[in-house]
Image (cartoon, rainbow, N blue to C red):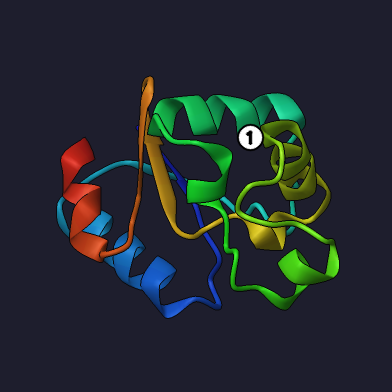
Amino acid sequence: MITYWHNPRCSKSRAGLALLEERGQQVELRLYLQDGPSLAEVTALRDALGLDAIAMMRSGEKLFKELGLTKTSPETDLLAAMVAHPILIERPIAAKAAKAVIGRPTEALEALL
């Protein structure tokens, strides 16, 4: 089962979901904008990605700058910002077992198959 952090309004997120479904994968949708993640969930996702928090953030979002965040902000601040403002989480992200990938480009999702 793949847990798919999905934003239905995002074309990349829709394309990634279509790819997973075409490959016959069982997908559990996590509509993270409607059902905000906890700090434990964001931290676990970061660990599964094997990246620093900044690498899983949409640093180009206007809100990122409004919050006074930078690419060198402390990890704890970045994680807290994603919990408080899930729009800052890059999309899409797919997770399976203890591994996760960001679906940009969409073909990156194939690493979980």
Residue plotted at (84% across, 62% down): 67
Task: Provide the residue designation for mark 1.
Answer: 42
Residue plotted at (56% across, 47% down): 54
Residue 88 position in % (x across, y down): 66, 59
Q: Furthest residue to the top?
A: 98
Q: Furthest residue to the front?
A: 72
Can you say whether 62 is above or below 45 in the image? below
* In-front residue for pair 70/78: 70
What is the quadrant of residue 65 in the picture? Answer: bottom right
Number of disc labels: 1
Residue 75 position in % (x across, y down): 67, 34
Q: Dot 1, how many residues are within 10 Å of its Cα: few (below 14), some (14-19), or many (20+)?
A: many
Residue 7 appears in view: yes
Residue plotted at (52% across, 33% down): 46
Can you say whether 75 is above or below 8 in the image? above
Mark 1 lies on a secondary structure that is: helix
Quadrant of image for the C terminus: top left
* In-front residue for pair 19/100: 100
Q: What's the residue type where badge 1 is placed?
A: Val
* In-front residue for pair 85/24: 85
Quadrant of image for the N terminus: top left
Residue 49 placement, left or right of 6:
left
Residue 29 position in % (x across, y down): 51, 49
Residue 10 placement, left or right of 108:
right
Residue 21 placement, left or right of 96:
left
What is the quadrant of residue 41 in the picture? Answer: top right
Residue 106 placement, left or right of 23:
right
* In-front residue for pair 80/99: 80
